[in-house]
Amino acid sequence: MKICVCVKRVPATTTRVVIGADKQLDPAGVEFELNPYDEFAVEQALQVKESGGEGSVTAISFGLADAKKELQKVLAMGADNAVLLTHNSAPHADGATTAKMLAEELRNTEAQLIFFGKQAVDRDQHGVGPAVATRLGIPCITEVVKFELQGNQVICEREIEGGRETVTAPLPCAITCQKGLNEPRFASLKGIMAAKKKPLEIKEVDLESAAVEVIDMSLPPERPAGRIIGEGPDAVPELIEALRNEAKVL
């Protein structure tokens, strides 16, 4: 079975965000990593391949040339080959543009399963997986926490408000992966050494005008400093007053 997994290079979640003069994230001094939700997607792709005993896993990313590092990690985890679609404007591309780039590459792969993380932690848009599936004309099941492959269909559980629902879909299909689906493996030393010999193709792509324009980007206002309102039972009325009239949570 041909399996593809789409991954993204994102700023580490511990990064101190700085907005540059161009109203975009200033990359100076920023540590980057593989999008955490994409690790669940990679692990599930590898598990499907291993349970079937045959097939291949291709990792695909759209970004700057520096994203080779993250693709090398995916290869070290066990993917068979990788493709990097690169353009200098990739970090500023909107979700629709990203979906179009990925769909054009995936259209020629004949993949039966395409895995995504449920979202990228840099923009939290959730939309790339479903948008790619729409462009390819295949079903998409989102935020999957349990996955099962039975013949030519998948049976998945996804989280909804107040519970879970079970969804089935025929192959080919796309899956976006949620935390709890699996436990991503670490790359072994053997895997790291093997990754150096695996194919990693870099393709320059052309971008059309973005469907979404970022007008402004700014950090949220700093929280005001906390304060202590008295001590003991005598402070309760003042506390209630502050919660009602200042914090407006009562």
Image (spheres, rainbow, N blue to C red):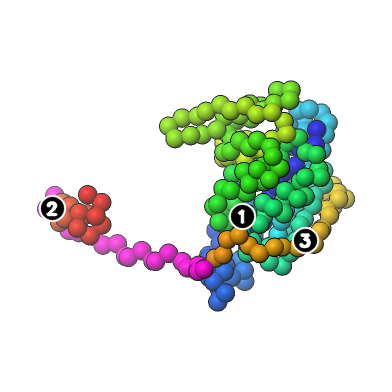
Quadrant that contains the N terminus = top right
Q: Which residues are magenta?
A: 215-234
Tag 2, which secondary structure?
helix
Residue 231 on the magenta span: yes
Q: Residues within 10 Å of mark 3 (few under 14, many from 20)?
A: some
The Cα–Cα distance between marks 2 and 1, rounded to whole angstroms, is: 50 Å
Residue 232 place in picture, x, y as percent: 16, 51
Gap between marks 1 and 3 measured at Cα: 16 Å
Q: Residue at x 66, y 57 (%)?
A: 97
Can residue 167 be seen in the rendering of this structure?
Answer: yes
Residue 205: numbered disc: 3
- Of the image marks 1 and 3, the number of the one nearer the N terminus: 1
| Residue 61 covered by magenta stretch | no
- Tell me, yes or no, whether the two marked residues, 1 and 3, touch with CB atoms within 8 Å: no
Task: Label 3, secondary structure: give it.
Answer: loop
In this rendered view, identify the residue nearer to me: 80 or 4.
4
Q: Residue furthest top?
A: 151
Q: Secondary structure at mark 1?
A: helix
Residue drawn at (54%, 71%) of the image: 23
Disc 3 marks which amino acid?
Val
